[in-house]
Image (cartoon, helix red, strand yellow):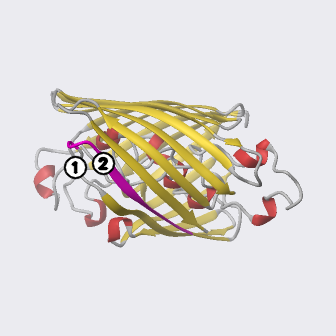
Amino acid sequence: MWRPPLRRSGLALLGMALAGPAAHASEAPAPDTPPSEDTMMEDVDTPPRWVEPPPSQPLDLHAWAEAGYLVPVGDSAEARGAYLSLARLQGQLHESDFDAFLQVGADHGDLDLLDARISWRPTDRVVLRAGRFKAPVSAEYLIPAPRLLFVHRSLHMALVPKRSLGAEAEVHLGPESADVALSAGIFDPADYALVPGSGELVTARALLHTGSGFGAHLAGAAWIHDDTAADALPYEAPDYERHLVAALLFEEHGVTAVVEGALATMGDEAAAGGVASVGYRFPVGHKELSLEPATALEVLNVAGHTETVGQVALNVHPHDWNLVQTLEWEVQPNQARPSHLLYVQLQAGL
């Protein structure tokens, strides 16, 4: 099954879905100075993509878009042609211990308010969030869109909660070299509607982040409701009542690796899925040009039907983080006749 490219690849700092800072021209090497490997990969002060960075300026504004062309190979492919997968505008206002983050998107041509969140940091180790933002259940889903390795997110995103209205409290424990973030949140499954009787989505997460680039994520979510909650919702009820997600992550020395598995249940029915991906970014000795080959295997099992997707991609970073070109080949071997898809995509932003 063809999936529209909802999210983009690359390590671009410009598009932090959780309101991270953009790369600045002042951080780039001087024109006559060859860029070092550290400069080509990540700024040394930049946390890995699965950790929300602190605000860097009183006001951050970012915009970026992703467009490409899909070439099907074989008779079983379902779609082809040009596409606009993502267009985003976001801003973050930082004042003392408070942050306000707003993001709108015209993904696939429809303009929507994606995030509207206020954060308060009463201490260095406590963060309180409220508004509309991503439910912290899947580690991959929390990775900002422009910093994914591939054209779209993994198949098992169908099993995890997405954005919704809610509130979350996060506490950081341990030293900076081995930080443990514990969080708990409550979200409204009716999203914007705030329908009485629709129940609550309760989340809990533990995230380990080490100074060596290793991370571990364990999260769960439960839709607490009575028998009438599904009828109260203005749209189709959530597909699952319980969610459990575990992930191992690594990002250091140009290597990015993500292994995540998800389990979701509704009554006696269960669905499971996961992804294993790895990429390596390295300079090629020409100004600021770097290449990032990556590969991934995705699996999704719903109602006894298993879907498998394999991917190989090459991300080309010709200048810092503001321009990324991607060539991706995807194969879906579980059909009667395996389908092959070739994506050619460009991401640009400021």
| Residue 328 relative to residue 159: left or right | right
- Quadrant of the drawing holding the C terminus: bottom right
Could you tell me if the residues under marks 1 and 2 are in contact, i.e. CB atoms within 8 Å? yes
Q: Is residue 90 above or below residue 120?
A: below
Q: Residue at left 22%, top 47%?
A: 238
Residue 118 in magenta stretch: no
Closest to the observer, 315 or 126: 315
Relative image position of residue 301 (x, y in whole percent)? 24, 30
Is residue 137 at all visible to an observer of this figure?
no
Closest to the observer, 218 or 342: 342
Task: Identify the amino acid type marked 1.
Answer: Glu
Kindly report which numbered mark, 1 or 2, lies closer to the viewer in this rendering.
2
| Residue 141 relative to residue 55: left or right | left
| Residue 122 relative to residue 273: left or right | right
Q: Is residue 6 above or below residue 280?
A: below
- What label sits on residue 148 in the rendered view? none
Relative image position of residue 150 (x, y in whole percent)? 47, 45
* Stretch in magenta: 63-76
**Which residue does the numbered mark 1 point to in the structure image?**
78
Where residue 138 sits, quadrant-wise, is top left
Where residue 260 sits, quadrant-wise, is top left
Q: Is residue 164 above or below residue 281?
A: below
**Which residue does the numbered mark 2 point to in the structure image?**
72
Q: Main secondary structure of the magenta part?
A: strand
Task: Identify the amino acid type marked 2.
Answer: Pro
Residue 68 in magenta stretch: yes
Badge 2 marks a residue whose secondary structure is strand
Q: Residue at left 73%, top 37%?
A: 176
Relative image position of residue 273 (x, y in whole percent)? 32, 31
Q: How many marks?
A: 2
